[in-house]
Amino acid sequence: MIGYSTSVDGHMDDASPFIWRDDEMITLSTFSGNSRSGAVAINDWGWAVGYSYTASGAEHAVLWRAS
C-alpha cells in the first residue's frame, strides 16, 4: 500500500509520502522535507512513483526504489 499522510488538521501543505510494508509505515524522502508530496502507484518490485514539490513550489515526478 502507498499514499500520503497529513498532519492532524489535514492540511496538504505538509503531506508526506509513505509505503506500508510488513505492518510498518515507511516515510519516503521528499525534495523539501515535508512539502506536499505523495506516492500514487507501486509495482511488483516495490518501486513507487509520485510527486514532490520543492521549497520554491515546483512540482517534480519522483521514483522511490525499494531498498
Image (cartoon, rainbow, N blue to C red):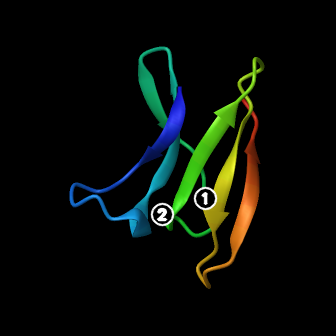
Q: What amino acid is labelled 1 in the image?
A: Thr
Q: Is residue 17 visible?
A: yes
Q: Is residue 36 left or right of residue 40?
A: left
Indicate the position of residue 3 as horizontal and vertical percent values.
Answer: 51, 40
Identified at 42% across, 16% down, the residue is: 23
Q: Between 29 and 41, which is closer to the camera in this rendering? A: 41
Q: Between 59 and 47, which is closer to the camera in this rendering? A: 59
Residue that badge 1 annotates: 30
Callout 2: 10 Å neighbours few (<14), some, many (20+)? Answer: many
Q: What amino acid is labelled 2 in the image?
A: Asn
Q: Is residue 52 left or right of residue 49?
A: left
Q: Between 28 and 61, which is closer to the camera in this rendering? A: 61
Q: Is residue 59 above or below residue 16?
A: below
Indicate the position of residue 17 as horizontal and vertical percent values.
Answer: 53, 47
Residue that badge 2 annotates: 34
Q: CA distance from mark 2 to mark 1?
A: 7 Å
Identified at 54% across, 33% down, the residue is: 2
